[in-house]
Image: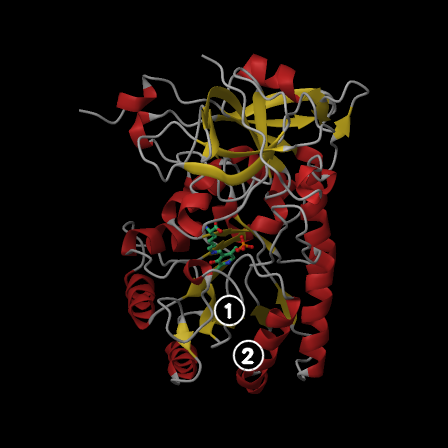
Amino acid sequence: MTQEPSEQPTDQPSEQPVDLGLLPLTSSVAADGRLSVGGVDLVDLAEEYGTPLFVYDEEHLRARCREALSSWGDGVAYATKAFLCKAMARLAHEEGMSLDVSTGGELHVALEAGVPAEKLVFHGNNKSPAELRSALSVGVGRVVVDSFDEIDRIETLLRGGTSSGHRLPVPTVLVRVTPGVEAHTHEFVRTGQEDSKFGFGLASGAAALAVERLRSSGLVNLAGIHAHIGSQVFRVESFAEEVEVLAGFFVPLGLDEMVIGGGLGVAYVAGEAAPTISQWAATVHDAARRSGIPSSVRITAEPGRSIVAGAGLTLYRVGTIKDLPGIRTYVAVDGGMSDNPRPVLYSSGYEAFLPRAVSASRPRAARVVGKHCESGDVLVADARVPRDLAVGDILATPVTGAYGYSMASNYNRVPRPAVVFVADGDARTVVRRESSADLVRLDV
Ligand code: LLP
């Protein structure tokens, strides 16, 4: 039986329709209140492609890549961990970005997409000998060296050559430094502090030792240093602090490159305001100048979230509405923690709205949940929904373009959604929906 969500008293502002600023760049609302992105009506799209469905505004993705390139210059890398498939790798490459890959898997996808190896930056705190061998033999543009064990492995590989007896090309490397700057963000996505599994500590002297070893081996081309302080960082001042701390170490080395990592935050819910990519770059460049870093040094970054988050949204179909009088209303959709684990992992907030009625006020409080077999399977803990929300409706969560599909799972053997790119009135599937056959394809 269909139940309507109960009406609960709320503050006036939260009844507001979804903030259009949270929607992809080419969003437009028709006279009847329906939302199109890239010239494609989202309710029609859901009918045609099924749900759950990840939808990306291609123009939005390209605009962010262009902004990154014009703000940071050549060498700025898209952090593929935020969202990677062949189409995304190609798009970032077409727009002139390099790509940050942090595993052999990401490396493989980028190469399969046709991205030239020299445009790839290879990361990882525990790169296996096999991963390193692949990266070195294809000739990735940069290897970000993360540990003394990795230096040993790289040197062994370079001394040994390839299985066919050829010498591996001399890699250009950056030393990953942990600057001891604590970004104001969730503990799990904070990485710049001293107590970290990533990189070489500055304060302990490990970073200086790593530079020394790489320089004296003569086996690699040491181009510079790299650091990353965390993710979903709203205060650009944290990045300025990072640069100031790094400068004291970096300037005397006389190296050519500094990469300050990714981490720029994005707004997920109404009321949040994030700096733009250009503001982020300007702040960092100012800090670099103030800190005495020569203007000849290439300072770049590797944004992930800020490129893709806002370009994407997820469409679900509402299947069940359960009104628990005096407690709350549960609105269950056909996806959940398998397509967006962020609320469960980081208590991340999202909004929900109906693409058929974008401008509708949202007087009702509801908890949007998934279809997985656990109570923690929450997508939007405190959603606001229109009065007439009903079973069968298409419900959307905006700003799901980063770390949604890339962290998706098959929990409860739920097939992963399809991903479509929309542009100029057309939709194209870039990742097909998993089928029941896919769910057993690895079983032997
Ligand atoms: N560079 C390095 C070395 C990184 O570790 C990361 C993210 C990035 C760049 C890109 O950061 P972004 O611009 O996307 O913030 N799963 C978490 C985020 C983990 C980020 C890990 N590293 C989440 O869903 O919030």
The residue most toward the left is 444
Image height check: is 187 above or below 27?
below
The amino acid type of the residue labelled 2 equals Leu
Which residue is more in the foreground, 321 or 179? 321
Question: Would residue 352 be visible to someone looking at this image?
Answer: no
Badge 1: how crowded within 10 Å, few (<14), some, or many (20+)? Answer: many
The residue most toward the front is 326
Q: Residue at x 65, y 73 (%)?
A: 297
Q: Is residue 26 left or right of residue 222?
A: right
Q: CA distance from mark 2 to mark 1?
A: 8 Å
The image quarter containing residue 356 is: top right
The amino acid type of the residue labelled 1 equals Ala
Q: Residue at x 59, y 44 (%)?
A: 309
Q: What residue does disc 1 label?
A: 227
Image height check: is 206 above or below 342?
below
Image height check: is 71 above or below 151?
above
| Residue 246's disc number | 2
Lower position in the chain sequence, tag 2 or tag 1: 1
Q: Residue 436 at what x, y percent from top left?
A: 33, 17
| Residue 173's disc number | none
Q: Is residue 329 left or right of residue 387?
A: left
Q: Residue 26 at what x, y percent from top left?
A: 75, 33
